Image (cartoon, rainbow, N blue to C red):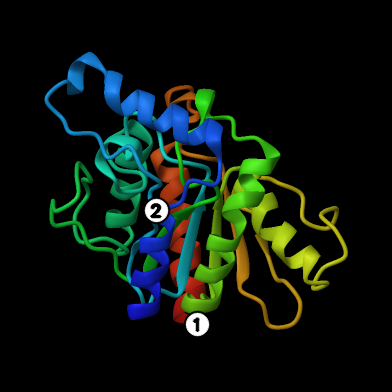
Amino acid sequence: MEALDRLNQTIVRCRKCPRLVCYRERVAFEKRRAFLGWEYWGKPVPGFGDPRAKLLILGLAPAAHGGNRTGRVFTGDRSGDFLYKALYETGFANQPTSTQRGDGLKLKNAYVAAAVRCAPPANKPLPSELANCLPYFERELELLRPRAILALGSIAMRTYLGVLKRRGLIGGFAAYPFRHSAGYELPEGLPRLFVSFHPSQQNTFTGKLTEQMMVDVLLTIRKFLGSK
C-alpha cells in the first residue's frame, strides 16, 4: 500500500523527541559486545506486516539492541522471538523466527506497530514522547482499518483507548480494565480490543506469560476474524 509506505518513510525520518534521538543514536554507536559487527539501524522503527491486515498488534517500543539494531519491530530480541513464534503457530506468520530485515519473514493478516517508535531509556517513554508518536498510530488505524486490535501490555492498551476517548467514542477507561486475555467489544462498530501481557523477558522468564497463553489469545482472535 503506497500510503502505508509513505507513512513509514515519515516515521523513519522523525526527530521529534530529542531525548529519544540522543539515546537511539548513542546505542547505535556504542553497540553491545555481541553485536559489534552489526551496523545498527539507530532510527525510528516503522510498522511491519500485511498491508491488508485485519489484526493490528500494538507493542510498547523497540528494544535498544533489538528493533533499534535491526530496524524491524520485535526483531532481534527475546520478546520478538516469543511473539513471532506464537504468530507462526497460529497462522499469522510464515516462519517462527525473526532475526533481521530480509530474513524472509512475512505476516499474514497481521500488522505489528509500537506506541513509541524509538527505543526509550530503560524501556520507559515519557508521556510527551507517547504523544509525539500517537499520530503515526492513528494514521495506521485509518489506513489498515483493522477488525481487531491486540494490545501487548497496559501502555499499548491505554494508547488505543486514549485515541478513542479523545475522539469521543468512549467515556473513559474504567469499563476496560487491563487483564491478560481480555476481549472488549467497543461501540460504533470499532475494532474489537484484545489484551495480552507484554512478551517482555520479565514476563516470559517468570512464567507470567507462557507460550500457550500467547497462542490462546491469538487463536481467539483468529476465531473472531473468521466469524466476520
The amino acid at mark 1 is Ser
Which of marks 2 and 1 precedes in the sequence? 2
Quadrant of res 48: bottom left
Choose between 82 and 65: the one closer to the eye: 65
Q: How many marks?
A: 2
Q: How far apart are marks 1 and 2 (CA)?
A: 39 Å
Q: Under tag 1, what secondary structure?
A: loop
Residue 47 appears anywhere in the view:
yes
Quadrant of res 30: top left
Q: Where is residue 134 in the image (x, y as percent from the top left)?
A: 61, 56
Residue 227's label in the rendered image is: 1
The amino acid at mark 2 is Arg
Lateral position of residue 107 relative to residue 163, left or right? left
Residue drawn at point x = 61 percent, y = 74 percent: 191
Q: Name the residue under label 2.
A: 13
Choose between 55 and 134: the one closer to the eye: 134
Choose between 145 and 217: the one closer to the eye: 145
Q: Position of residue 135 (x, y in %)?
A: 59, 62
